[in-house]
Image (cartoon, grey):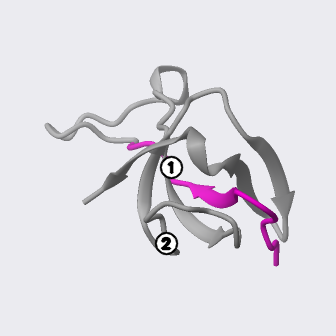
């Protein structure tokens, strides 16, 4: 398991919807990337209300991608998280 240091947060990215609201199935070519993720761990120096299991929106090109145990994680600075999804 990864443990974030300082003001970093570890996210696991949510998969983009493969079907539209009307039921149309999207192919891989038309798939839009989502920048919504679930918080897996929060560094001890994070001074915001972000907590484990929150769904958050983060800046599109920020963070470091890491693959561990067949899961893809993003290590990101807390300031690059834009909103909490409620």
Q: In this image, 11 relative to 83: left or right?
A: right
Nearer to us: label 1 or label 2: 2
Which of 36/24 is in front?
36
The image quarter in which residue 18 lies: top left
Query: Measured along the vertical axis of the image, is residue 55 above or below residue 74?
Result: below
Name the foreground residue: 25 vs 62: 62
Residue picked out by circle 1: 15
Work out which residue is located at the far bottom of the displayed protein and give it.
1
Rendered location of residue 28, percent (x, y)? 54, 29
Estimate the spatial distance between the alpha carbons at disc 1 and disc 2, rounded to whole Å. 20 Å
Q: Identify the residue at image location x=82%, y=72%.
A: 2
Majority secondary structure in the magenta region: loop
Answer with left or right where residue 21 lies relative to residue 43: left
Which quarter of the figure is the C terminus placed in? bottom left
* On screen, residue 66 above or below 59: below
Residue 29 image position (x, y, % from top left): 54, 21
- Region rendered in magenta: 1-17
Q: Which numbered tag is attached to residue 51? A: 2
13 left or right of 77 in image? left
Q: Is residue 44 above or below residue 21?
A: below
Q: Is residue 44 above or below residue 34?
A: below
User: Few, some or many C-alpha atoms within 10 Å of disc 2 (few <14, some 14-19, many ≥20)?
Assistant: some
**Residue 24 appears at what percent x and percent y?**
25, 34
Q: Secondary structure at mark 1?
A: loop
From the viewer's perspective, tell me whether residue 26 is left or right of residue 6: left
Earlier-in-chain disc, 1 versus 2: 1
Q: Secondary structure at mark 2?
A: loop
* Front-most of residues 29 and 86: 86
Dot 1, how many residues are within 10 Å of its Cα: few (below 14), some (14-19), or many (20+)? few
Magenta span contains residue 10? yes
Instruction: Give me the disc on residue 86.
Output: none
């Amino acid at each position: 398991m990864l443990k974030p240091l300082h003001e970093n947060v570890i996210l696991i990215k949510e998969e983009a919807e493969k079907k539209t609201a009307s039921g149309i199935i999207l192919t891989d070519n038309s798939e839009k990337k989502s920048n919504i993720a679930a918080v897996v761990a929060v560094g001890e120096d994070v001074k915001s209300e972000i907590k484990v299991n929150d769904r958050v929106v983060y800046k599109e090109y920020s963070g470091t991608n890491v693959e561990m145990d067949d899961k893809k994680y993003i290590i990101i600075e807390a300031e690059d998280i834009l909103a909490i999804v409620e």
